[in-house]
Amino acid sequence: MSFLEKIPSDLINFLLVTVFSLLIGLEQRRHHMDEKKDSLFGMDRTFTLIGILGFILYIIAPDNLIIFIMGGVIVSVFLGIFYLKKIENKDKYGLTSIIIVLITYSLTPLIYKSPIWLSIMVVTTVLILTQLKQQFRMLSGKFDDDEFITLAKFLAISGIILPLLPNTQISETVPFSPFKFWLAVVVVSGISYFSYLLKKFVFPKNGMLITGFLGGMYSSTATTVVLARKSKEENVAVNQIAASIILATGMMFIRVFILVLIFNAPLAGHLAGPFAILTFLTFLTAGILYKVCKTGENTELQKPKNKNPLEFNTALLFAFLFVLFAVITKYVLKAYGTHGLDVLALVVGVTDIDPFLVSLFTGKYQVVLPAIANATLIAISSNNLMKMAYAIFLGDKSIKIPLIIAFSIIIVTSVVFIFV
């Protein structure tokens, strides 16, 4: 028998309650360092003693919690009296410290009834949340009026609607289930929403490279158009414009591969090698453009209004295109085989490729995975060709040659993978 096994469990739990209560009390002392002592309920010793009180009242009758509950009621009465006097004398209404006292009192049954990691997680969360008051205040100032409505929309479509849908194929013409159909809407919206949150709360400064990086997660085509037009302004950093456009394409490869992993894991094995090489090559090309084409001043885009990525019209359009491409793909495969699928992928590349690719990944088509992998690469290559055209016609002449070279390298590499 080891030394730890010889120690009574009650002793270990008592030490845990004491240490956790003391840590919470010390944090409260540090948090209220600048406040007058007579305006506080207690500090480190008070919190520790409250934790010990909860331990004593619990172990007296662990199977019958009446004594523990009565102690909690008495503590709550004292807290209520303190709170009323605090309002009367200090005109302060905060309940945080009182709630932390009650959490401290409740540590003992938590330690006895649950795994130790859960108790540690609760204490850690209390310590962190108390210290982040100022940060939360700053964060809340960044929220728009409808920010929580946007979050509620995402929770509704992912946590309420999705689980209720059946996972059986709709029909022979539409080769996927309602669950897979709505999952596609959730995943694509989720990636866009994640990009939106990063841009708004983590990278609020709208720098060129950040625009390329995060814009590629949402839509590399739209990002290319915005940045190409920006290049015609005076004294802009051409290296940042060109690098950011290519960077957006690199993020497009990552976004598409995430969709492959989610909807068709076996297909991911066929695309992992080509996508890894293309992503590395794209980022390397972006880095070279940033270093070599050094002209103009470092610039930031004018801060645009952050577009809600969960607009109903956007989701509805994606859903419509998703079903449309699924039906067209089914027909093309039946009538023309894999060669027809390749032609369809080439044509679709000039539009928004996400609905087509997701329908390709989720549909139950009678076609081998290498053919789907080829169609994916063809659609992406066609889309990159279209982005290069946008950059040439909409951008300043100073970025045309660098982008033609960069996109040509990416497209040619993709074509090599298609034939190999």
Image: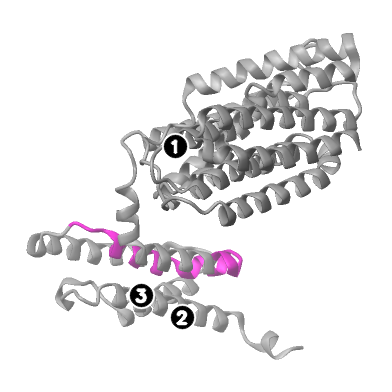
Query: Dot 2, crowdedness within 10 Å: few (<14), some or many (≥20)?
Result: some
Give the residue pinned by disc 3: 27
Residue carrying label 2: 19
Q: Dot 2 lies on which element? A: helix
Task: Give the x, y percent position of residue 71.
Answer: 35, 67
Residue 358 seen in this snapshot: yes
Marks 1 and 2, how far apart at CA: 58 Å
Residue at the extreme left? 89
Magenta region, main secondary structure: helix
Do the numbered discs 1 and 2 sit on residues whose CB atoms are within 8 Å? no
Q: Is any atom of residue 68 visible in this view?
A: no
Residue type marked 2: Val
Question: Which amino acid type corresponds to the residue marked 3 in the rendered image?
Answer: Glu
1 vs 3, front mark = 1
The image position of residue 348, as x and y in percent, is 70, 20
Mark carried by residue 230:
1
Query: Residue drawn 12% across and 64% down?
Result: 85
Residue 11 drawn above or below residue 273: below
Residue 37: x and y, percent?
A: 18, 78
Residue 264, which numbered label?
none
Left or right: residue 8 versus residue 327 is left
Number of numbered labels in the structure image: 3
Query: Image quadrant for the N terminus?
Result: bottom right
Residue count near mark 3 (Cα–Cα under 10 Å), binned few <14, some 14–19, many ≥20: some
SS for dot 1: helix
Tell whether label 3 touches label 1 (CB within 8 Å): no
Lower position in the chain sequence, tag 1 or tag 3: 3
**In magenta stretch: residue 373:** no
Report the front residue among 260 and 105.
Answer: 260
- Which label lies toward us, 1 or 2? 1
**Which residue is drawn at the image coordinates 73% and 18% (left, top)?**
347
Please give the range of residues in magenta: 93-118
